[in-house]
Image: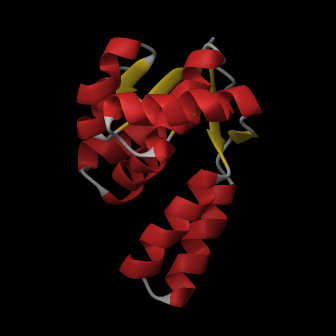
Amino acid sequence: MNRYLLDNSVLIEGLFGSKRGLKQFIRLNKLANAKKVELYSTKLLFFEFNNVIRFRFDSLSSNYLFRHLLSFKVKILEPNREEFDLARNLAYETDTTFYDASYHILALSRGMIFLTMDKKYYRKAKIMGNIVLFDRTRF
């Protein structure tokens, strides 16, 4: 069974991006509901998602969207101290944000595939492995 670690860019593309992104997101969610894949992320996902919807939607719509997010089958992981250290080092090595590096390190250290739509980060860090672009993945 494939285990995917999602960052916020996957949610944004899946919910607000292209028609293809929405279809891809629906397919992934159906696979998770059928227990054919497992989806993971960190608490950071909720902060990033709320920040995006705060600037795109009114309060009522934002509340609805966040409740909808909570219905997805995403298990939340907590990085350990070593993973924090590795993520910080990776962020320096790749000249990227700690946020992006932390998602990637969690995927690497726990044998998952990091799903992202962040093409800039992907180009810089793909050599590390365990990372795929959401819109180029077949589920």
**Residue ID at (39%, 48%):** 9
Q: Quadrant of residue 16?
A: bottom left
| Horizontal relation, residue 105 to residue 138: left or right | right
From the viewer's perspective, is 119 left or right of 82?
A: left
Q: What residue sits 49% from the left and 46% below the top?
A: 99
Q: Most extreme residue toward the bottom, as rendered? A: 59
Q: Is residue 112 visible?
A: no
The answer to which image quadrant residue 111 occupies is top right
Residue 14, placed above or below residue 61: above
Q: Is residue 30 left or right of residue 122?
A: right
Q: Is there any visible trace of residue 15 in the rendered image?
A: yes
59 up-or-down from 100: above or below: below
Q: Residue at x 42, y 44 (%)?
A: 10
Q: Where in the figure is residue 67, as x and y percent of width and height?
A: 66, 67
Query: What colour-coding does the image apply?
Result: secondary structure
* Nearest the eye: 35 or 2: 2
Q: Residue 125 in the image: state x and y as whole percent.
A: 34, 24
55 w.r.t. 21: above or below: below
Quarter in which the N terminus is drawn: top right
Q: Nearer the viewer, residue 100 or 70?
A: 100
Residue nearer the viewer, 39 or 93 = 93
Residue 46 at x, y percent in the picture: 61, 59
- The quadrant in which the C terminus is found is top left
Percent of width and height locating residue 135: 29, 33
Rendered residue at 68%/57% (across/down): 70
Q: How many marks?
A: 0
**Closest to the observer: 138 or 107?**
107
